[in-house]
Amino acid sequence: MNEFRIFTGNSNPGLATKICRYLAVPLGDAKVKTFSDGEIQIEVRENVRAKDIFVIQSTCCPVNDNLVELLLMIDGFRRSSAQRITAVIPYYGYARQDKKVAPRVPISAKLVANLLTMAGANRVITMDLHAGQIQGFFDIPVDNLFAAPVILDYIKTIFKDNLVIVSPDAGGVERARAFAKRLSAGLAIIDKRRDAPNQAKAMAVIGDVSNKIAIILDDMVDTAGTLTEAADALSKHGAVEIHACCSHAVLSGPAIDRIKNSSLRSVVVSDTIPLRAEALNCDKFKVLTISKLIGEAIIRSHRGDSVTSLFV
């Protein structure tokens, strides 16, 4: 146990603390602060020579600050002769920009992968990547975990029958189908048309949702346009209750107000991203912790054990 250390930046110290509590190890001593001009200063206050280092940092809002914190911490550990550095990124920012959707645009997810590798990361542990092919952007090992086991346990505990799992768009059908199979539930799909970034309009519901409890499944909720439009469409088609389960609570812009004023009964999210204060004060939000899942991935990675069972 003395051969590995866990450190964190400022993006999600609460999750890092839970992970350390699960593993029964102290959180590493590192100072991450900002100069008056906005530059980030990193100082590791303990010996990490020849140690196996895990840096827990979600690249959530403020995305660029948290990303630079992560890069500087990795560089600091590399220059301090750490044996191996694993970037634990519960939420991988820039993941939505994973291909060229128009002329003369960057592939930002690939650039971030290059930055992490060049900074000195030897391995990446992340969760519910927006696009699975991002793993191929790295030339180092990537473990893409899923919040599905935690969310499935919650659904099985709270909802007993008469369920239909809903994909809010065509891209999430595979995920929704896997949940529906595990829960012996029905499957429905929202035919969504997007006119501009962060603006979605649900057009039609494919599948039977009448008199059923509908659970919308997605990897993230950003401005909540997709969720609220989907909820409205499901309500019009006769769903008696509408809930949502998402791995990453980005909740930017008008998201929280939209959810408060929508027909959604609840929105279940994981703690890959810390909830904003407004969301914490809204009784529609339920937070599930993925600390045990990531903690298991960390200890198995350190010991060289298989992590295959974590993907089930």
Image: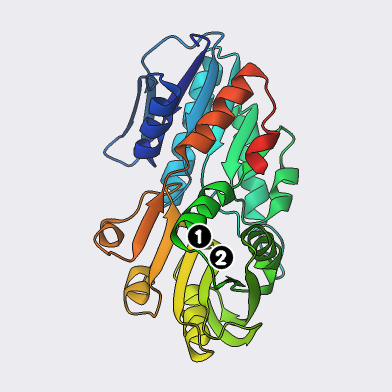
**Residue 102 relative to residue 31: left or right:** right
Compared with residue 291, is residue 20 higher up or lower down, i.e. above or below?
A: above
Quadrant for the C terminus, please. top right
Residue 147 in sight: yes
**Residue 246: mark:** 1
Q: Is the residue under label 1 in contact with that under label 2 (CB below 8 Å)?
A: yes
Residue 65: percent from left, percent from top: 42, 44
Q: Residue furthest bottom?
A: 236
Q: Nearer the viewer, residue 251 or 290?
A: 290
Instruction: State which quadrant residue 18 falls in.
Output: top left
Compared with residue 181, is residue 263 higher up or lower down, i.e. above or below?
A: below
Residue 256: percent from left, percent from top: 34, 69
Q: Please tell me how crowded label 1 is: few (under 14), some (14-19), or many (20+) other residues with Cα within 10 Å.
A: many
Q: Nearer the viewer, residue 20 or 117?
A: 20
- Which amino acid lies under the numbered mark 2 shown in the image of this protein? Leu
Q: Nearer the viewer, residue 111 or 138?
A: 138
The residue singled out by tag 2 in the image is: 217
Instruction: State which quadrant residue 179 falls in.
Output: bottom right
- Which amino acid lies under the numbered mark 1 shown in the image of this protein? Cys
Q: Please tell me how crowded label 2 is: few (under 14), some (14-19), or many (20+) other residues with Cα within 10 Å.
A: many
**Residue 298 relative to residue 101: left or right:** left
N-terminal-most mark, 2 or 1: 2
Instruction: State which quadrant residue 308 falls in.
Output: top right
**Residue 86 relative to residue 110: left or right:** left
Q: Secondary structure at mark 2?
A: strand
Q: Residue at x 59, y 72 (%)?
A: 166
